[in-house]
Image: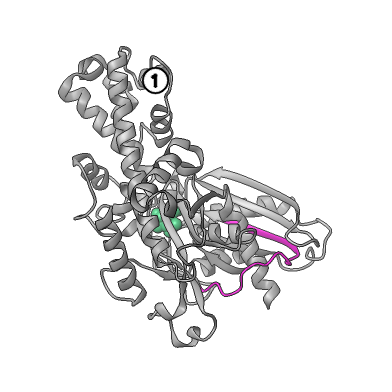
């Protein structure tokens, strides 16, 4: 964990200088933060995990008040993950228009104006201003060359224009940036935003003087800027503890050779690593009756993606005396016979993989906290965290906290407050869009 912290510091510094082999360290160009005085109606799109979320919100006259809100989620359809077919943004526009249809006649100050939308897009984008960003690479399950190198704000605006709809998109941001902003709205000492869900990443507030790659014109605009680290892309194969199953998970992923840190941490890969380890025990050590005991065509455990991180969580948190939760999950995987000792082994596999993720994540949190320039060591550092892996998996949260204590000691670790901001991305995107149009 200590070597990882050193490695992260090295790669963060290289990235801030724009040098090769460093983390991407992408400037967010956020220089106006929401302050609660924003009013009016706004939309937000949150795209990047397993679901698309569209939010409509009416910010009230009272400071920080949300007068009304409407949120809807849709699972991203399979065909949209293949970005070469160009369907993704058309589908997103359909869903935005569906929500907009419910509010276009809403009486209010903004109803006759062009609707304003904050765009939270959870992939690495190279921005030169808040309202643009070239997509650098797809991660998670997204494949293909679609939109790579293109400005995703123009691309989405073009789709709306082609349908005769005018929409203003003043702010594009990563989900980590939106999460940080969403909490900072009510908690001004928030210095980091982390996502632990399908993917993982972190944004933090850096001193402008340290971002040497930032164009000179921007250096005079403010003293600090939110940086999207893209820590999932940390290329530290030499320091990451990996087993053979990790190599297979990488090999069969949509982006082999990339996102090594993400692949030992985030929810999309955790179930897959566990699945492959269990399968190896079934195959080599006849666990649960061995391969001969299952119907090969009808065994989810033999299928890629057949075992997910929600199952890892349920097994890791199985406190029943006979491990009945673990047994019933294994039965649903096609293993009719499983004894308590075998269930205990499976639980141990889940705990080990989850613990590895939590401890590596804690090391990365420490690395970034140590880089936050404005917070003294005695001050509380508030870290906004969103993503289903962290939000829904209580034992995982405990494991991260324990690892922070192991690294820093109880007292220093107690100064890092991990604060869940469930659904912060869409809210942060709407607030930032509101603050940006208010500042104009
Ligand atoms: C993406 C990040 C994103 C993270 C969490 C990663 O795969 O590269 O931009 O913040 O997932 O959604």
Residue at image position (64%, 72%) is 436
The x, y position of residue 314, in whole percent, is 43, 29
- Asked if residue 36 is among those painted magenta in the image, a careful observer would answer yes
Frontmost residue, 110 versus 78: 110
Q: Is residue 84 visible?
A: no
Q: Which SS type dominates the magenta stretch?
A: loop
Q: Residue furthest right?
A: 107
The correct choice, above or below, for 94 with respect to 27 in the image is above
Extent of the magenta region: 29-45
**Number of numbered discs:** 1
Q: Mark 1 points at which residue?
A: 332
The correct choice, above or below, for 52 with respect to 64 in the image is above
Q: Does the residue labelled 1 lie within 8 Å of ligand 1?
A: no
The x, y position of residue 11, in whole percent, is 29, 67
Frontmost residue, 116 versus 161: 116
Frontmost residue, 9 versus 280: 9
Residue at image position (81%, 62%) is 61
How did the renderer colour the structure? Answer: one colour
The x, y position of residue 309, in whole percent, is 40, 36
- Asked if residue 34 is among those painted magenta in the image, a careful observer would answer yes
Q: In which quarter of the image is the C terminus?
A: bottom right
Tell me the SS state at disc 1.
Answer: helix
Indicate the quadrant of ligand 1 in the picture.
bottom left
Q: How crowded is mark 1: few (under 14 residues within 10 Å), some or many (20 or more)?
A: few
The answer to whether residue 280 is left or right of residue 162 is left
The correct choice, above or below, for 74 with respect to 277 in the image is below
The x, y position of residue 17, in whole percent, is 34, 77
Which corner quadrant of the image does residue 296 belong to?
top left
Q: Can residue 256 be seen in this view?
A: yes
Which corner quadrant of the image does residue 34 belong to?
bottom right
The answer to whether residue 354 is left or right of residue 103 is left
Residue at image position (24%, 28%) is 279
């Amino acid at each position: 964990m200590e070597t990882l912290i050193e490695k992260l510091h090295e790669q963060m510094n290289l990235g801030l200088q724009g040098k090769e082999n460093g983390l991407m360290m992408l400037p967010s160009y956020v220089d106006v933060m929401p302050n609660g005085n924003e009013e009016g109606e706004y939309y937000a799109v949150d795209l990047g995990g397993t679901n698309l979320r569209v939010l409509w919100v009416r910010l009230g006259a009272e400071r920080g008040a949300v007068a009304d809100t409407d949120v809807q989620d849709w699972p991203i359809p399979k065909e949209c993950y293949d970005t070469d077919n160009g369907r993704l943004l058309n589908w997103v526009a359909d869903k935005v228009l569906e929500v907009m249809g419910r509010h276009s006649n809403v009486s209010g100050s903004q109803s006759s104006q062009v609707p304003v939308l904050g765009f939270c897009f959870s992939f690495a984008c190279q921005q030169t201003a808040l309202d643009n960003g070239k997509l650098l690479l797809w991660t998670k399950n997204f494949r293909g060359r679609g939109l790579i190198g293109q400005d995703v704000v123009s691309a989405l605006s073009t789709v709306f224009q082609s349908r005769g709809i005018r929409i203003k998109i003043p702010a594009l941001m990563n989900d980590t940036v939106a999460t940080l902003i969403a909490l900072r709205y009510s908690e001004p000492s928030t210095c980091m935003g982390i996502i632990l869900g399908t993917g993982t990443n972190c944004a933090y507030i850096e001193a402008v003087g340290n971002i040497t790659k930032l164009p000179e014109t921007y250096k005079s605009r403010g003293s600090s800027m939110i940086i999207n680290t893209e820590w999932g892309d940390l290329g530290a194969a030499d320091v990451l503890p990996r087993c053979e199953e990790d190599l297979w998970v990488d090999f069969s992923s949509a982006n082999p050779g990339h996102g090594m840190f993400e692949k030992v941490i985030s929810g999309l890969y955790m179930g897959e690593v566990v699945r492959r380890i269990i399968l190896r025990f079934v195959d080599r050590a006849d666990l649960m009756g061995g391969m001969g005991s299952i119907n090969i065509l009808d065994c989810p455990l033999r299928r890629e993606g057949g075992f997910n991180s929600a199952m890892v969580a349920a097994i890791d948190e199985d406190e029943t005396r006979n491990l009945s939760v673990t047994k019933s999950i294994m039965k649903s995987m096609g293993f009719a016979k499983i004894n308590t000792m075998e269930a205990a082994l499976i639980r141990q596999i889940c705990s080990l993989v989850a613990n590895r993720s939590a401890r590596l994540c804690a090391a990365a949190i420490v690395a970034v906290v140590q880089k936050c320039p404005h917070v003294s060591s005695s001050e509380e550092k508030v870290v906004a965290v969103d993503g289903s892996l962290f939000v829904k998996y209580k034992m995982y949260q405990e494991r991260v906290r324990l690892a922070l204590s192991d690294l820093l000691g109880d007292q220093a670790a107690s100064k890092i407050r991990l604060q869940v901001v469930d659904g912060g991305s869409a809210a942060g995107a709407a607030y930032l869009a509101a603050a940006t149009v208010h500042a104009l």
